[in-house]
Image (spheres, rainbow, N blue to C red):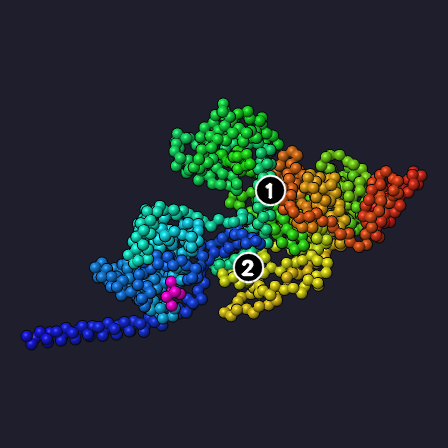
Amino acid sequence: MRRLPRVLAYLLATLLSLALLGIAGVGVLYLYLSPQLPEVDSLRDVRFQQPLRVFSADDELIAEFGDYRREPLRYEEIPERLKQAFIAAEDERFFSHYGVDPVGLARAVVYLARHREIGPGGSTITMQTARNFFLSREQTYLRKLNEILLSFKIERELDKEQILELYLNKIYLGQRAYGVGAAARIYYGRPLSELTLAETAMIAGLPKAPSIANPITNPERALHRRSYVLRRMHHLGYITQEEFAEASAAPVTAAMRVARPGLQAPYVAEMARALAVDLYGESAYEDGYRVYTTVDSRRQEMANEAVSRNLLAYDERHGYRGSEARYDLDEHAEADAWNRLLRQHGRVANLQSALVLSVDDEAGHAEIYTGGERVELPFSAIRWARPWVSQAVVGQAPERPSQVVSEGDLIRVRETEDGLRLAQVPDIQGSLVSLAPDTGAIVALVGGFDFRGSQFNRAAQALRQPGSAFKPFIYSAALERGFTPASVVNDAPVVFEDDALETVWRPENYSGRFYGPTRLREALAQSRNLVSIRVLRDIGPRYAVTFLDRFGFPSERMPTDLSLALGSAAVTPLELTAGYAVFANGGYRVEPYVVSRIEDGRGQVVYENVPTLACEDCQELEGGTTGLTPVAANEVQGEEEAEPVAVPRFRPAERTLSASNAYLMTSMMQDVIRSGTGRAARQLGRDDLAGKTGTTNDLHDAWFAGYNAELVTTAWVGFDQARSMGPGETGARTALPMWLDYMGKALDGVPSGTTPRPSGMVTVRIDADSGLVTSADNPRAMFETFRQDQVPEQERSSDDRRGGSGSSSGGGSGQPLF
């Protein structure tokens, strides 16, 4: 009996020794590992990886860039029910332990002893937070020890609410969703506060296997996890029996709901993205920057519609090129197979794919499948589709549906006021850019028919010949050299042996006719080529190229030969629009821009564009400041916040053109619309519009650039690989309708305004033929405006004219007939 107490004493001593050795070992491990552990103080000011977001001027989301979909939430913004769901599923003793749950840890030790490997269980929410922020996911003993030690450290530094907030914002929940806020949006398209109990439990069940057991990839497995979460919530008393039963019976309603932009402006988004990456590098995709553009969502939608409608209208004029593909419906006989085929031909802009199931000529329709439903496509929606032969030739109009479509055809359709209409992806391309002439702020920009089909931004990147849309700049140079709107130039055949062109050149007007002596105003309105060439020859191409710098045109792209008069230079639609802005704002060169400011993830402004402003007396406005702190591309912020500085609201724009020149050119371009090649614009019923059509050789490009004091807008249409658009496809027919569709709506509600006449100008009667001052009784008399020092001489009497030399005058000293 005495030996038993002695054995017990030895056993207790052994256990005590082992315990002391264990404690000592843990202490040694702690002393060894603790200095290597990261500082958890950084968690107090953590910055979650968030995508780059681009917004319109009126806060509409345009695009998101980046792999991380996250919507960080503060603790108080997270619903209590969701917190309970995660605690029930992941760590029921979260609010009572000190970072490590002894019960869970014991369970993990038993698993290790049985299976000789690290297994599931034992990880508290605090331990998961430590792993997510500081450690890898590799299953090693050292990583697990670091995780435990870090958990203790986190619990000492942060309170439970802070830890849970970090965890719920950081955790990966599948489908590129990081954090519960993003998961609610992606799976249910709603904020957390609007989720049902069943939906909340579904999200809380995701951490175990977010990639392979989420409700999108594996609904059945996700349902099992949801049931587990609901049982745990019921067991812990978080929900009642009735709530448990109702949520358990709820169907799976999750679906992939990628954040859809509120505004379709992909070319603008790409311009904004490029600037952000240029400023902040690859971190732009992760640091939650918000880029605010100058785009007006209402006008951008109008621009989208105008470009789409008019490119499709052009395409219909030139015939139907046939279906995109044809399939054997015996091999694809079910709706699932049809859906797979439609997915292979995704949506292009506003055109959806459809499969022709049958064609009934007697009933006069085709039955099509658009994904989920069968629809009858009437012959009235097909009738336009004359067969395409070439850009210049189309075949006979169809008389029945079967002449256009057949069973198994994969076609395109679009929504119209009359229902679905047969369509096709246009071969032609186009762009529209619209900006505020007083600041250069881009309010709408479309760079092509469909961004997914082609990311090339034709509005900002396409170098094209502007044709006659360039003539106003040549005429402006002529006014600077002493010409007036009444100067008379001979519109007659001419042959040039131009060394620069290295050929004999016989230019002619688009109509092929010649009109004789013509005033400059009339020549611009009717787009007389020969007058423009003679004007450029008189002022000199080299002077013209130098003068064009006033409008921002790069001299290296300006030819120094007479072809410049007909718009042979290479410019982008945006450059042309900025050039017209000089006329629209009274003579100031403004710098176009599309990004107004950038905010970081905390909402602090880190970049702000200070625009140029066209103003007569900028000193009166210069006192105002934004009080914000822009951080330019070459500025690097340190640990301390930069001191706020006063930032001007604008930079005064440079006057590059006299007010009188800008006024006269606007007046002359208003005649383009009143009586010239742009007279279709009279349908808008406004008297403040000015502009110019443009058509290049062989009908490769069609343009219309026009403006009033509110907006300056350019529409362009052409093929990416330049070729003829077909007979009659001029600027007036092809580009002007696009401009009208947009400007008619964009200026709705904007009152017509008159441009104030600059000082030092007078209006007198002139003879419409000679351009000279005449009397009121002259039946050919008309009014014209001049600078005071350029009023023409008085018209001579009929007797004097009979003895004259046959020249007429456009300038104050009597210019010869050119």
* Location of residue 616 with respect to 525 vertically, above or below: below
Horizontal relation, residue 81 to residue 723: left or right: left
Dominant secondary structure, magenta: helix
The reply to whether the magenta stretch includes residue 162 is yes
Horizontal relation, residue 117 to residue 181: left or right: left
The reply to whether the magenta stretch includes residue 493 is no
Horizontal relation, residue 280 to residue 46: left or right: right
Residue 437: give x, y in percent of width and height: 67, 52
Q: Pointer 2: what residue? A: 598
Q: Residue furthest top?
A: 362
Whichever of labels 1 and 2 marks the residue nearer the N terminus, that label is 1
Identified by mark 2, the residue type is Ile
Q: Pick whichever, 591 or 237, lies toward us.
A: 237
Marker disc for residue 306: 1
Determine the residue positioned at 48% across, 48% down: 260
Secondary structure of the residue carrying numbered label 2: strand
Residue 190: give x, y in percent of width and height: 44, 51
* Location of residue 678 with respect to 102 vertically, above or below: above
Identified by mark 1, the residue type is Ala
Determine the residue positioned at 58% across, 26% down: 396
**Chain part drawn in magenta:** 159-164
Horizontal relation, residue 413 to residue 724: left or right: left
Determine the residue positioned at 59% across, 36% down: 313
Residue 472: give x, y in percent of width and height: 72, 46
Determine the residue positioned at 31% across, 49% down: 245
How busy is the neighbourhood of tag 1: few (under 14 within 10 Å), some, or many (20 plus)? many
